[in-house]
Image (cartoon, rainbow, N blue to C red):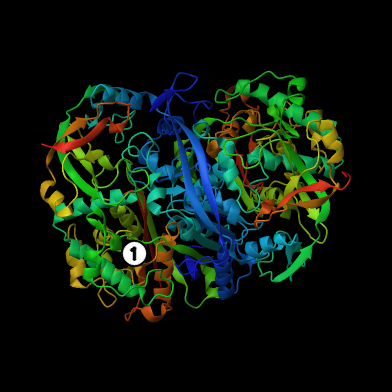
């Protein structure tokens, strides 16, 4: 029985709109990762996908639709909905069980086909209460941002700095969707959507097909010289109604705690070399950085101002440009992981961090104001 | 680049009949009489609005309905400047979490009754802990929006 | 607004309508362009040599690109069929109708479409006319828009 | 291969038309039942797996958010597994792998559907993409009727004989359901009632087709160590299998259906089963349609290809037969779709744990549970045994 699991390689598509059909686009990315690793479709042990149905795609049981495009013909497999990092975790389980020595993990999203994420997330509401008041993700985020500002004195400019940093990083990422050279003024002057949230502080709607090949220790060593090892994982669910929650005490803390315990991490700020955080709203990068222990509660504003999360800082956050630069809603968690893997492998091209990258954190979140969080730790 | 091979417009259009259950039924009936009903957990003593069929913390069945205060404080709020799918009103409008007096959770609802056209003006007027009171619509439908909004005192 | 279902329990009725704009991509686009000339295209896999209809970009089994476009016949045989006689909300084709999986001459898989030109009121007669092996031929719409319904239906050759 | 895993608790709601409760309340009812059955509390649970038919069936997306409280999942790790009709089986398999991998010791697995709140076939038709298949296939019955036609024609089974075998399945199962307190449709039917029923999607008539049900099923999986400590009669997972087929309906042969055959092969291999008819004591075959049950008998090796009708008419798969199938009444009588395949797992576990009450198959030691889904595309299987 294998006791370690590695990510052998990754492939991803750019976030901008593609004229390709959904199925061809997915086939392309699966083919790419298989070709890169020299593994044939027949050799793949099983396929775990991450996708969402109808709402993010317009087709129910999307796993039926894309099964063969995802290399799944006559294969064992399964699918995770919600947070795509769960597909990675499930892949890890499959290998640790000893039943499979390779797992293809795919994240699937063709955002350009969908209505706005605000429309889709309106259907997350219960029909009796929150739907009648018109709740969607952006309202939940704005309520959370205001609470964050009011409670800790976080400034709007500090939140806006996250956009400047991340879109700046995205200029060097060929897979990023938004590529704009911007400054703080641009963000502060952008259109108010749900005060205090401004348009440029909200993630776009992007495409994203991503594929990762996982392998058992023995198999990984055959397939690559630079395996990236699974180190830890945690996830946690919060209660449903916004009004029952403290919007500033998120389950991210619990998710991170589990992941750190598994990975043996005691001082995350010191031990983690790079973090990719799911920040569909700019301020959330600050709040989530607090949650994973990069700084204390209420210190997110100071963290961004200190420069620590810049490419050359002591804890670079979102060198890919993050979700603000590329938001394939359904697969964005796996995009975070893919970037961390490339950084650790030293294959991040122009955006490769200058320092040694041995341990990385990938974070994903779904649901209103971060109802669910997942944290994955991988390393050399 | 765009989809130069053309696209296919496709609407998913489906009908629903949601089972309301006795608890939301009681809540809606209360709204029709200009009452905001909650209920209390027999185990932890928390009072929830809207009332619940079970306590989200203790998972026990809830006690009888009690009418709660129609006044409370703003916990957090946002001013919508754009129209969104499913929005209850045309923009601008304020969505807020409101802690009604004596209740153990926040109610998601609207704040209004004054000029919302200017963000700066609204920010001066609406703050955390600002006290508000329910304003009712004349016509009641057994719907959350039978409360027109909460207006600042 | 609350109403009551037949058991007396309170319900809220609603409809959801969510729009999508799906990319055809080069393969669907070219396939339906063929329809405008009353041609049905498949693609051949250079590994397993099968011709698959509708034409597509890759072979799901061999997982290689399929670049070789092949025109297949307008005629074929019925492999399997179903007569649908019930209706649901927003049903795209109104019942009763017969759907069949058809093996078009020159292809190696089934192609799904409607069977038409048959009186569907008498089930026994339907079963005589429509069966495995029945030869059928595409009947095209006069006006073509580049979609699957450009073929109105497939008609059994036994029907004049 | 991995750690040994057992089922130590299972709960079901009364399935049926459940307009009396909201959806979260229905979920809670099933979850509570599993906790009571296992004598556990949420504090014992390391993680929660949830899923439904992945669709807009009930008009709420990402239902695990909505049900977080009802699932007792707050503050816990969660997985959301969904694979169409096989969802329930995929849920169980997720629970199995979570424990087998050593990443969790006790996992709560919940599947649910409240089909009366939507239009099930309108929803089901959205499984079909709109470029090609959607205008032609009328929901699930449309897809699976084709299988029946192909099966009869492949093996030259006279239509009347196929009809009679399928009719017997319908009559028997609707009767079996009287002994299952959770079942939705319980009915005394005559063969004529079935064979003269209204055509829905020919050859399927009214009583060949499963109902729409509202219901929840919850199953608790545990590691060997925990199971031995916490449960007097655990149901041990002996084998699992899952296989997916191509999407385009015309691409594969669905009669001698490789996808189903391969699924069984995987599960039998792990469980060490070489002669299923002899070695299995009971099977919960996923039978949303009568003919589909017949085809799976063949794919799973319960009889020779083309011989399912004969064996069925002989009573091989009846309650007192050699391999009783679906003594619960099966999907044909109860179909809350996201829960349905998990109900098969729960029923199989109840059988080997001796907890199946009036529909207990005496002395059942090895039981098979099956799930089916997609555009006739997915099979999943779990084999349970009374001993490790």
Left or right of A359 in this view: D227: right
Vertically, is A308 above or below A243? Answer: below
Which quadrant of the rendered structure holds the C terminus of chain D?
top right
Q: Is residue D295 visible?
A: no
Image quadrant where one finds the N terminus of chain D:
bottom right
Residue B21 at least partly seen:
yes
Q: Residue at x 55, y 22 (%)?
A: D181
**How many marks are shown on the rendered structure?**
1
Left or right: D182 in relation to A272: right
Q: Chain of mark 1?
A: A
Residue ID for mark 1: A324
Image x and y of residue A33, in percent: 55, 70
Residue D307 coordinates in the image, percent (x, y): 82, 39
Q: Which residue corresponds to the image point at 45% horizontal and 18% vertical from the top-left?
A: C8
Looking at this rendering, what residue extends furthest in the front direction? C142
Q: In front here: D139 or D149?
A: D139
Compared with C155, D112 (above or below) is: above
Rendered image quadrant of residue B31 = top left
Reply above or below: D38 against D86. above
Q: What is the x, y in percent for residue D297?
A: 74, 39
Q: Position of residue D19 (x, y in %)?
A: 46, 25
| In-image side of D100 versus D380 (left or right) | left
- Neighbour class for label 1 at 10 Å: few (<14), some, many (≥20)? many
Badge 1 marks a residue whose secondary structure is helix
């Amino acid at each position: 029985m294998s006791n370690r699991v590695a990510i052998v390689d990754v492939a991803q598509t750019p976030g901008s709109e593609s004229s390709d059909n959904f199925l061809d686009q997915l086939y392309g990315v699966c083919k790419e990762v298989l070709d890169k690793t020299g593994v044939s479709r027949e050799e793949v042990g099983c396929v775990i996908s991450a996708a969402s149905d109808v709402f993010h795609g317009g087709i129910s049981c999307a796993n039926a639709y894309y099964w063969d495009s995802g290399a799944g013909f006559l294969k064992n497999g399964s699918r995770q909905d919600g947070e795509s990092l769960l597909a990675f975790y499930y892949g890890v389980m499959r290998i640790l069980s000893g039943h499979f020595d390779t797992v293809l993990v795919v994240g699937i999203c063709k955002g350009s086909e969908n209505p706005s994420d605000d429309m889709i997330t309106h259907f997350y509401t219960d029909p009796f209460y929150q739907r009648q008041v018109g709740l969607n993700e952006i309202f939940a985020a704005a309520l959370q941002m205001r609470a964050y500002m009011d409670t800790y004195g976080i400034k709007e400019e500090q939140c806006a700095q996250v956009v400047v940093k991340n879109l700046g990083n995205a200029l060097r990422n060929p897979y990023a969707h938004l590529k704009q050279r911007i400054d703080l003024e641009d963000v502060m002057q952008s259109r108010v959507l749900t005060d205090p949230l401004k348009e440029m502080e909200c993630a776009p709607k992007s495409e994203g097909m991503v594929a990762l090949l996982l392998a058992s220790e023995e198999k990984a060593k055959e397939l690559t010289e630079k395996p990236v090892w699974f180190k830890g994982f945690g996830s946690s669910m919060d209660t449903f109604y916004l009004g029952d929650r403290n919007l500033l005490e998120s389950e991210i803390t619990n998710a991170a705690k589990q992941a750190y315990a598994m990975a043996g991490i005691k001082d995350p700020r010191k031990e983690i070399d790079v973090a990719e955080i799911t920040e569909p709203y700019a301020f959330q990068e600050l709040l989530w950085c607090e949650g994973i222990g990069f700084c204390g509660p209420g210190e997110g504003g100071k963290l961004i101002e200190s420069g620590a999360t810049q490419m050359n800082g002591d804890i670079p956050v979102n060198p890919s440009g993050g979700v603000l630069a590329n938001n394939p809603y359904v697969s964005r968690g796996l995009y975070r992981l893919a970037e961390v893997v490339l950084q650790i492998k030293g294959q991040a091209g122009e955006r490769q961090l200058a320092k040694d990258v041995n341990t990385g954190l990938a974070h994903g979140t779904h649901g209103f104001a971060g109802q669910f969080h997942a944290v994955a730790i991988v390393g050399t | 680049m765009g989809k130069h091979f053309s696209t296919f417009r496709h609407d998913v259009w489906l009908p629903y009949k949601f089972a309301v259950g006795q608890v939301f039924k009681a809540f809606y009936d209360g709204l029709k009489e200009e009452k905001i009903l909650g209920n209390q957990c027999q185990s932890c003593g928390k009072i929830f609005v809207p009332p619940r069929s079970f306590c989200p913390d203790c998972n026990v069945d809830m006690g009888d309905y009690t009418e709660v205060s129609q006044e409370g404080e703003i916990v957090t709020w946002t001013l919508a400047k754009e129209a969104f799918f499913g929005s209850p009103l045309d923009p601008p409008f304020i969505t807020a979490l409101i802690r009604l007096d004596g209740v153990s959770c926040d109610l998601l609802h609207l704040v209004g009754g004054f000029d919302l056209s200017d963000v700066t003006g609204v920010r001066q007027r609406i703050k955390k802990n600002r006290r508000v009171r329910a304003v009712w619509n004349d016509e009641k439908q057994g719907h959350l929006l039978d409360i027109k909004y909460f207006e600042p005192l | 607004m609350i109403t009551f279902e037949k058991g007396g329990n309170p319900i809220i009725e609603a409809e959801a309508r969510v729009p999508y704009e799906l990319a055809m991509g080069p393969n669907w686009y070219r396939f339906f362009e063929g329809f405008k000339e009353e041609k049905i295209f498949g693609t051949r896999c250079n590994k397993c040599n099968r011709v698959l209809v509708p034409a597509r970009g890759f072979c799901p089994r061999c997982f290689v690109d399929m670049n070789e476009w092949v025109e297949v016949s307008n005629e074929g045989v019925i492999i399997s069929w179903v007569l649908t006689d019930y209706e649901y909300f927003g049903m795209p084709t109104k019942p009763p109708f017969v759907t069949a999986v058809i093996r078009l001459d020159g292809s190696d898989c089934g192609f799904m479409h409607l069977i038409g030109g048959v009186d569907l009121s008498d089930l026994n007669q339907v079963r005589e006319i429509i069966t495995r092996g029945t030869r059928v031929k595409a009947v095209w719409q006069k006006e073509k828009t580049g979609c699957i319904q450009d073929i109105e239906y497939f008609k059994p050759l036994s029907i004049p | 291969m991995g750690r040994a895993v057992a089922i130590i608790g299972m709960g079901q709601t009364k399935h049926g038309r459940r307009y009396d409760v909201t959806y979260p309340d229905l979920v809670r009812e099933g979850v509570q039942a599993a906790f009571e059955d296992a004598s556990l509390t949420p504090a014992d649970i390391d993680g929660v797996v949830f899923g439904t038919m992945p669709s807009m069936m009930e008009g709420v997306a990402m239902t695990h958010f909505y049900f977080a409280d009802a699932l007792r999942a707050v503050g816990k790790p969660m997985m959301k597994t969904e694979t169409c009709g096989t969802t329930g089986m995929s849920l169980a398999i997720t629970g199995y792998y979570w424990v087998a991998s050593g990443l969790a010791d006790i996992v709560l697995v919940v599947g649910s559907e409240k089909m009366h709140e939507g239009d099930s076939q309108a929803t089901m038709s959205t499984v079909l993409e709109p470029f090609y298949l959607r205008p032609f296939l009328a929901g699930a019955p449309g897809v699976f009727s084709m299988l029946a036609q192909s099966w009869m024609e492949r093996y030259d089974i006279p239509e009347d004989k196929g009809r009679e075998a399928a009719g017997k399945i319908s009559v028997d199962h609707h009767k079996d359901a009287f002994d299952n307190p959770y079942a939705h449709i319980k009915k005394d039917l005559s063969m004529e009632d079935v064979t003269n029923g209204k055509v829905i999607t020919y050859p399927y008539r009214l009583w060949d087709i499963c109902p729409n049900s509202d219901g929840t099923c919850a199953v608790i999986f545990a590691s060997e160590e925990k199971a031995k400590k916490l449960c007097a009669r655990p149901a041990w997972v002996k084998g699992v299998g899952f296989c997916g087929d191509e999407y385009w309906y015309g691409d594969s042969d669905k009669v001698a259906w490789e996808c189903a055959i391969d699924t069984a092969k995987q599960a039998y291999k792990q469980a060490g089963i070489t002669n299923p008819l002899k070695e299995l004591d009971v099977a919960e075959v996923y039978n949303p349609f009568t003919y589909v049950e017949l085809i799976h008998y063949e794919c799973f090796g319960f009889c020779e290809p083309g011989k399912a009708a004969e064996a069925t008419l002989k009573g091989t798969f009846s309650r007192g037969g050699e391999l009783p199938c679906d003594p619960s009444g099966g999907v044909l009588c109860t179909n809350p779709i996201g829960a349905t395949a998990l109900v098969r797992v729960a029923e199989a576990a109840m059988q080997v744990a001796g907890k199946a009450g009036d529909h207990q198959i005496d002395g059942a030691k090895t039981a098979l549970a099956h799930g089916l889904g997609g555009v006739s595309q997915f099979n999943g299987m779990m084999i349970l045994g009374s001993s490790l």
